[in-house]
Each structure stands twice: as structure tokens, then as C-alpha cells.
């Protein structure tokens, strides 16, 4: 049996009772560590303290040895995980909800093709936790991902999706890039030697807005402007989560603190949405400080 278990967003206590029971009866436990991370596993300088996080999971709550499943393991050695699940119970832990990333859907498909039984235990995800700001979930359009720009790679395929959402009056959730254990360019170009990895990087709201405005300036189709209202989120689901609403220009100046961050570009709003959103507007927050 393969259990795919959502951990929620904040810390080790967000696992459901059903999920915890599945972990405790599994012979092998893996935790996926590249599509997202629990907020308590990231230090203030933005680096993931993965070893400490998994030691805490093992020793204080789950009572199981946990194997970290990084990108290479999930994408290249998934069959090894599934092979174990043919003869024993295996738990695969996922931050947020199991189906928040296409990687996990692929794992289910491969398991079923091998005849492995699969049980999914759902949990909170960024896709519904953003409702805290008051924007109604059914008024969102297509979600987009914003990758880090490089000197030679500055993709803008997300622009059309945002533009379509805005024309329909819908909100847009922007998922911001997370880069954990990414091979360095030198390592990719080398045919021998040990793989070298880039330091972990987590996109901040300010970087996302800078890139969005750069693409708008290049495209010039007025999908949004620096005056467009947005909502920035940091560490959703944790005790110190931060939610701030304001124009893109205003949010550029906000220190959202440690990761993980995400951003919503606001579409047309209902009066009830406006009333709730008003609690998070920058001017009001400054007045309360």
C-alpha cells in the first residue's frame, strides 16, 4: 500500500489523525522536499534547516525514520519507492495537499500501473489557505507559477494567463519559485565528478512583483500596472503568517520576512470581498502599528 499524506502548511502538528495513523503503521516513510517546505523548517535567512526539521518529525511526533525524497529521488527513482509499496506499507509525505503538485499525480499514475494500492490523505494547501484574505475562492482564475529570471532566461508565458483572468474579472494566484538542491550550471556541464548544488532560494513577493512589472513593460498590453491591487502572503498556515494588501508599488516596499511567499493579483471584487480585504490593506496596517 502507498499512502500519500498531506502535512498541511505550518508545522508537524498539522498532519491529520488519519495521516498520522497511516505514518505510524508504515514500514517506510518518505518526505518530499522540493515542491514545498513546512514553514517551521525554514530559517530566517531563507535556508531550509531540513535535517533539524526531519529529526523533529521523527523524534517528537511521528516516531518513524524518515527518508528525504528530493527532486532526483522523486523524478528518477520513484520506481524504487513503488517497489517497496508492492510488499509493505509505504508513506509518502507531502507539504500541503497531495495533489498540489503534478509530480504527485504522476506518482499515483505510476503506482496504479504497477498494481500498487494507493490511499490519499488530504490536508490544507496554499490553494485554499489564501481564502484568509477574504477573496472568494470560486472567483479565482488559472493559477500561475513565477520562476526566477536568469541573465539568459526570462520566461513570460504566465502573462497571457494573468491577462485572461483579468479580462474575466478573476483573481490570480501566483506561486513563487522554490529552488532546493538544484544542480549548478557547472555541474550540469561536467561529465564527471560529484554533483554540485546551488544554495536554496525562495522567491520573495518583492522579486515576483519586479519580474511581473518587467514583463508588463516589455509586453505593454496593460494586463496590470504598478497600481494594480495585490495581496502578498508569507508563511501561510503558521503562527506568524503575514497577509498584506496594497498596490504592486506599495508591496514592493513591504518586508514579508522569511519564506515561503505567494502573491495574488486581485480581479473584480464583490462588496463582501472588499470589506474583508480592507483589514489587510497597507494603510490600515500602518495605522494599527
Image (cartoon, rainbow, N blue to C red):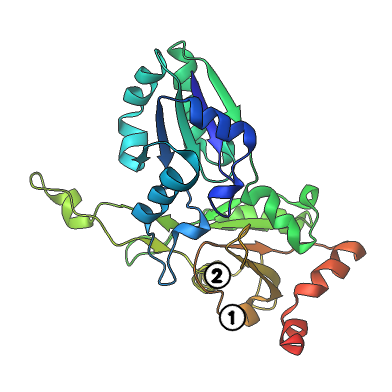
Q: Which mark is residue 145?
A: none
Locate residue 247, reporting x and y percent: 69, 77
Q: Quadrant of the C terminus?
A: bottom right
Residue displayed at 44% across by 71% down: 44
Q: Please, what secondary structure does the residue beneath circle 1 have?
A: loop
Q: Which residue is mark 1?
A: 254
Q: Which residue is mark 2?
A: 205
- The answer to which image quadrant residue 153 occupies is bottom left
Quote the CA–CA distance across marks 1 and 2: 9 Å
For this rendering, which residue is in front, 50 or 180? 50
Check if mark 1's residue and mark 2's residue have beta carbons within 8 Å: yes
Task: Name the N-terminal-most of marks 1 and 2.
Answer: 2
Q: Is residue 7 above or below residue 29?
A: below
For this rendering, which residue is in front, 216 or 72? 72
Crowding near pointer 2: few (<14 within 10 Å), some, many (20+)?
A: many
Residue displayed at 10% across by 44% down: 191
Q: Is residue 187 left or right of residue 45?
A: left
Farthest right residue? 271
- The answer to which image quadrant residue 242 occupies is bottom right
- The answer to which image quadrant residue 265 occupies is bottom right
Residue displayed at 59% across by 28% down: 120
Q: Is residue 201 above or below residue 34?
A: below
Residue displayed at 41% across by 36% down: 64
Q: Please, what secondary structure does the residue beneath circle 2 have?
A: helix
Locate residue 224, reporting x and y percent: 66, 69
For this rendering, which residue is in front, 114 or 120? 120
Q: Is residue 190 left or right of residue 261?
A: left
Q: Is residue 167 above or below residue 228?
A: above
Determine if residue 122 is in view: no
Locate residue 134, reporting x and y percent: 80, 61
Locate residue 20, reporting x and y percent: 56, 35
Determine if residue 66 is in view: yes
Amino acid at each position: 500500500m502507498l499512502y500519500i499524506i498531506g502535512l498541511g502548511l505550518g508545522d508537524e502538528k498539522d498532519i491529520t489523525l488519519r495521516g498520522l495513523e497511516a505514518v505510524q503503521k508504515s514500514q517506510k516513510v518518505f518526505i518530499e522536499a522540493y515542491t514545498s517546505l513546512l514553514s517551521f523548517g525554514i530559517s530566517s535567512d531563507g535556508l531550509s534547516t531540513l535535517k533539524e526539521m526531519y529529526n523533529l518529525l521523527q523524534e517528537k511526533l511521528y516516531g518513524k525514520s524518515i527518508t528525504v525524497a528530493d527532486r532526483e529521488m522523486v523524478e528518477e527513482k520513484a520506481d524504487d519507492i513503488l517497489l517497496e509499496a508492492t510488499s509493505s506499507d509505504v508513506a509518502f509525505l507531502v507539504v500541503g495537499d497531495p495533489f498540489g503538485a503534478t509530480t504527485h499525480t504522476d506518482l499515483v499514475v505510476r503506482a496504479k500501473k504497477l498494481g500498487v494500492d494507493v490511499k490519499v490523505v488530504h490536508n490544507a494547501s496554499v490553494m485554499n489557505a489564501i481564502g484568509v484574505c477574504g477573496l472568494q475562492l470560486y472567483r479565482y482564475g488559472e493559477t500561475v507559477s513565477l520562476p526566477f529570471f536568469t541573465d539568459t532566461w526570462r520566461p513570460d508565458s504566465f502573462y497571457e494567463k494573468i491577462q485572461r483572468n483579468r479580462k474575466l474579472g478573476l483573481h490570480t494566484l501566483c506561486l513563487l519559485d522554490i529552488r532546493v538542491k538544484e544542480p549548478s550550471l557547472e555541474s550540469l556541464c561536467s561529465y564527471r565528478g560529484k554533483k554540485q548544488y546551488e544554495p536554496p532560494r525562495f522567491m520573495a513577493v518583492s522579486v515576483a512583483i519586479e519580474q511581473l512589472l518587467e514583463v508588463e513593460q516589455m509586453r505593454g498590453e496593460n494586463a496590470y500596472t504598478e497600481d494594480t491591487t495585490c495581496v502578498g502572503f508569507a508563511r501561510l498556515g503558521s503562527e506568524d503568517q503575514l497577509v498584506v494588501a496594497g498596490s504592486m508599488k506599495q508591496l514592493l516596499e513591504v518586508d514579508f520576512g522569511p519564506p515561503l511567499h505567494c502573491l495574488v493579483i486581485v480581479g473584480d471584487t464583490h462588496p463582501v470581498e472588499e470589506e474583508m480585504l480592507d483589514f489587510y490593506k497597507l494603510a490600515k496596517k500602518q495605522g494599527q502599528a
